[in-house]
Amino acid sequence: MWISNAAWLKEREDAIQLRVERDAAKQTLAQQETTLAWFMHRLTQVESERAKLIFNFTGVKVDAPTYEKETSQAESNRINQNPLNSLRVSPM
């Protein structure tokens, strides 16, 4: 089957554009996951500091939750996975 040069060049440009968009989306996702991991770490740290302060001033032991990424098999198989949906809060 023959195709015109203009049509072939158009298809090639479209393929290159799709590759560029895909790579940009992958980079954005990686940045979002890194940011989310940092937020989870900081929030866990703040919660533990809050629990220590409450214990120091009142003598009441308060459980501090830890925030970590959920690692269930069903979650990892999800096609349209948003990093913000994968948060899990567990008590310490």
Image (cartoon, rainbow, N blue to C red):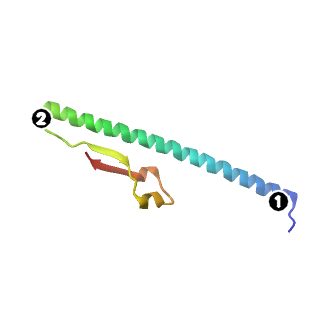
- The picture places residue 19, in percent across and down from the top left corner, at 67, 51
Q: Secondary structure at mark 2?
A: loop
Q: Position of residue 13 (x, y in %)?
A: 76, 52
Which amino acid type corresponds to the residue marked 2 in the rendered image? Gly
Please tell me which residue is depicted at 77% across the width and 54% down the height of the picture. Answer: 12
Q: Quadrant of the N terminus?
A: bottom right
- Quarter of the picture holding the C terminus: top left
Answer with mark 2 or mark 1, whichever residue precedes in sequence. 1
Q: Residues within 10 Å of mark 1 (few under 14, many from 20)?
A: few
Image height of 5 relative to 34, above or below = below
| Residue pictured at 72% horizontal, 51% vertical | 16
Q: Position of residue 4 (x, y in %)?
A: 87, 61
Q: Are marks 2 and 1 in contact (CB under 8 Å)?
A: no
Q: Residue 7: which numbered mark, if any? A: 1
- Residue at left 81%, top 54%? 9
Q: Secondary structure at mark 1?
A: helix
**Which residue in the structure is indicated by mark 2?**
59
